[in-house]
Image (cartoon, rainbow, N blue to C red):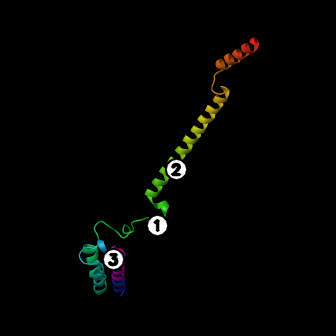
Amino acid sequence: MLLRVALAVAVLVIFVYGLVDVIRTDGRLTRGISKPAWIVVMIVLPVIGAILWLLIGRPRGTSPQQSQRHPTAPDDDPDFLRNLEARRRNQAEAERLKRLKDELDTKAKNHGDGKAGGMDKHETDKHETDEHDTDELK
């Protein structure tokens, strides 16, 4: 009696696993016959159909977990995370360059104010002396 129950449970598990795997597999990836034909085979011949599906019909090198190609959440996607990190680095570099440019502009402005219109101290002193000399001559 226990053996019959165990056998019935095993057949049911194999049938359900095979049927779900056929349904979840992309129709273009099935081998042998078309996807609807595999579903019919699975229903008509539950255990044999599941075994044939696993041996013949299933795409090579795939498992049920691999049939889902895209991660469910963005933080599980390595490409998204890599792009996010690259974007963060680029943004930090752009901010750093902007700060350096602002510092350079500030220094240039302060340096320009100290020169009195672009002339250095010696030119300014000479110009003031020349004006003073011309005032005395008048």
State the separation of the CA atoms marked 3 and 2. 42 Å
Residue at the top extreme? 137
User: Residue drawn at (69%, 17%), measured in percent from left and top?
Assistant: 125
Image location of residue 10, percent across then percent down: 34, 80
Residue at the front extreme? 138
| 47 relative to 88, above or below | below
User: Residue drawn at (56%, 44%), measured in percent from left and top?
Assistant: 95
Quadrant in which the C terminus appears: top right
Residue 115's image quarter?
A: top right
The kind of residue tagged 2 is: Arg
Dot 3: element: helix
Q: Earlier in the sequence, mark 1 or mark 3?
A: 3
Which marked residue is nearer to the observer: mark 3 or mark 2?
2
Dot 2: element: helix
* Magenta segment boundaries in residue numbering: 11-26
State the separation of the CA atoms marked 1 and 3. 21 Å
Which marked residue is nearer to the observer: mark 2 or mark 1?
2
Q: Earlier in the sequence, mark 2 or mark 1?
A: 1
CB within 8 Å, label 2 to label 1: no
Q: Which residue is mark 3?
A: 22
The kind of residue tagged 1 is: Thr
| 129 relative to 46, above or below | above
Q: Which residue is mark 1?
A: 72
